[in-house]
Image: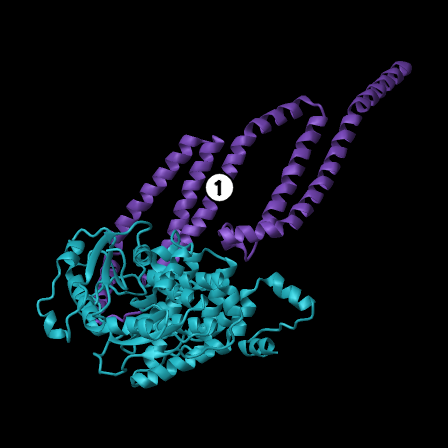
Chain colours: A cyan, B purple
Amino acid sequence: MKSADIVIGVPSFNNARTIRHVIQAIEVGVEKYFPQSRAVIVNSDGGSTDGTREAVLSTHTDDRYLMLLSHPLYPVHRLATPYHGLPGKGSAFRTIFRIAELLGAQACAVVDSDLRSITPEWIELLLRPLVHAGYDYVAPYYLRHKYDGTITNSIVYPLTRALYGQRVRQPIGGDFGFSGRLASYYLRQNVWDTDVARYGIDIWMTTTAICGGYRICQSFLGAKIHDAKDPGADLSSMLTQVVGSVFQLMETHEDRWMATNSSGDIPLFGFRYGVGLEPISVNLERMVRLFRNGLSELRNVWEVALQPQTVNELVSLEGLEPRKFHFPDELWVKVVYEFAATYHRRSMNLAHLLRSLTPLYLARVASFVVETQESLADEVEEKIERLCQIYEEQKPYLIVHWQPPTQRAREREVGAEVHHTTPSQAGVAAKG
Amino acid sequence: MIQALERILRQSWDRLGEQVGDLLPNVLAALLILVAGWVTAKLARWAVHRMGARLETSFRRWGFFADYYQHTTASQVFSRGTFWLIFGSAILMSINALNTEMGSLLITGILSYLPRLFTAGLVILAGLLLGRFLARGVLIWAVNEGLEPARWIANAVRIGVGLLTVVAAAEQLAIARTAILATFVILLSGAVLGVALAVGIGSRKRVEEWLDRRAALLEEQKHEQPIEHL
């Protein structure tokens, strides 16, 4: 096959149990919604030993013709190939981008290989904005439990929005659509020997598309249900990887985010709906205990990363009971911004810095849970929106602390008044 | 007799004068070298400190010395090192200028010992940095895991690395190698045996309670539906 209109990539590693369903959903989705297009499913595999690649090639859908309205013009081809480079999702995506470029595909998508809730409609929602509306990047928009996605809701979404001015609600969703020209743009970036190749690919794709000036939109896909993850998965590592990637991208795109002053909505395709989701029991006492332990044992570390006033405000939270625990939005935003600035200044080892954020993050989650216990989904979304506004209002505070002390001193010498002790003063000074 | 006494005293004074006359130039040269060395060392320290700003940025980017920036900067470390290198050399030169047998022996001994001293210094510096780095990493890990004696675990790591550093430095300096190594092995074995006895006999009940609490916590976590953080 020398060319294709559509390429759907599925990165995998030992996902034989779940990948059949994903391949079936993709195949039916392409045949149902793009029957006149030539399509290829590319499985980019990281060396599975459980027969994942064989499962991809041997999967067939018995009752597909019950789901289709018309016969497709072309069969959907499948390609299962190992990827090369650093082990990780980024390297798998690079292989998919390369194949898409070689085949000259105009519309591409990538989906996770352990999805249980994927339907053929996902393919339409990820590709139609590219094919018919001229967009270059389609981010997912999932229906999630109010307590899920707390890293996204409290850090990645509001920070990305404040920095780059685009309200991509779920920038690290994992299932994306992108145009062929955007795939070629991704391939030209020199990141494939960095942490992007290992674990930072999702936020990198979103941020690069925004900063590259491509047209961005999002599609409502409904609930995202994975194969059950290992409950012992390390939160600290996850936080380090995600937040580290975001901070690293801040250094790459410093000029862009420093010049961005506000944010705007991006189009949302798909029919939004809400359903009741199973309640999740959360161990507040454990989260608050971890925070208190962090306060007593990691204070020396936090004093390197944070301003003295911020540390004092954190200390004032120590005595709060778990059921009444409250971590103010303004304080949380200051913590994130000061960590970003410390990351940039390299004032301490980066792994230590990012890992020491874990107790603070858990404190934030505990506070969020307490504040939204009785809240419905819409009310929770309003709360997240307020948090985003605080991120945007306090952005001048970030800009000031991002700069090295010598540069701040030089600005004072030439008469630019930079008197910052509180974010509100920073905001007034920046606007002035 | 008085004349003999006078003659002896005069001869004695003359000999003293000759000896002082022989020694004085050396002493003056030694003092001059010391003063010149001190002035040169001061100037070099100032120059290295001024040039250090660029070095600081690089070291900061690479993460080297990153943890110490709150108290000491890289340029301060290098400028102080430069000062003592130059002034130390001046001290040796001034001792040599005295042209005494003991001075020559001293210098020969110091110069032959310098490489070992330098290596031992590097070993100690590396050990201190490594111990501190590892201790902090372990502390953060232990806190994130919810382990209550987090600081004890971190201190144990720091002490362990410190002891290894002392043994390695002593090996370099050829100071009581066997004795220090034997002491280290005895201390380590004793500590391990002591902890085993304390846990097994003395603190059995406390350990049981801690293990029960830990098991209850893990059981609790197993039954709660975890949040999907991403």
Q: In the picture, which quadrant includes the C terminus of chain B?
A: bottom left
- Tell me, yes or no, if residue B7 can be seen here: yes
Direction right: furthest residue? B3
In-front residue for pair A395/B140: A395
Res. A204 image quadrant: bottom left
Q: Name the chain letter of the residue that bears numbered label 1.
A: B
Direction left: furthest residue? A62
Q: Position of residue A375 (x, y in %)?
A: 31, 85
User: Count the marks: how many?
Assistant: 1
Vertical comparison of B217 with B71: above or below: below
The residue lying at 47 percent from left, 48 percent from top is B129
The residue lying at 53 percent from left, 50 percent from top is B59
Q: Position of residue A159 (x, y in %)?
A: 43, 71
Q: Residues within 10 Å of mark 1 (few under 14, many from 20)?
A: many
Residue labelled with disc 1 = B124
Vertical comparison of B10 with A250: above or below: above
- Tell me, yes or no, if residue B149 can be seen here: no
In-front residue for pair A304/B198: A304
> Is B230 positioned to the left or the right of A243 in the image?
left
Q: Position of residue A352 (x, y in %)?
A: 42, 58
Q: In the picture, which quadrant includes the N terminus of chain B?
A: top right
Res. B161 image quadrant: top left
Element at label 1: helix
The residue lying at 44 percent from left, 79 percent from top is A264
Q: Amino acid at mark 1?
A: Ile
> Is B218 positioned to the left or the right of B7 in the image?
left
> Is A229 positioned to the left or the right of B86 in the image?
left
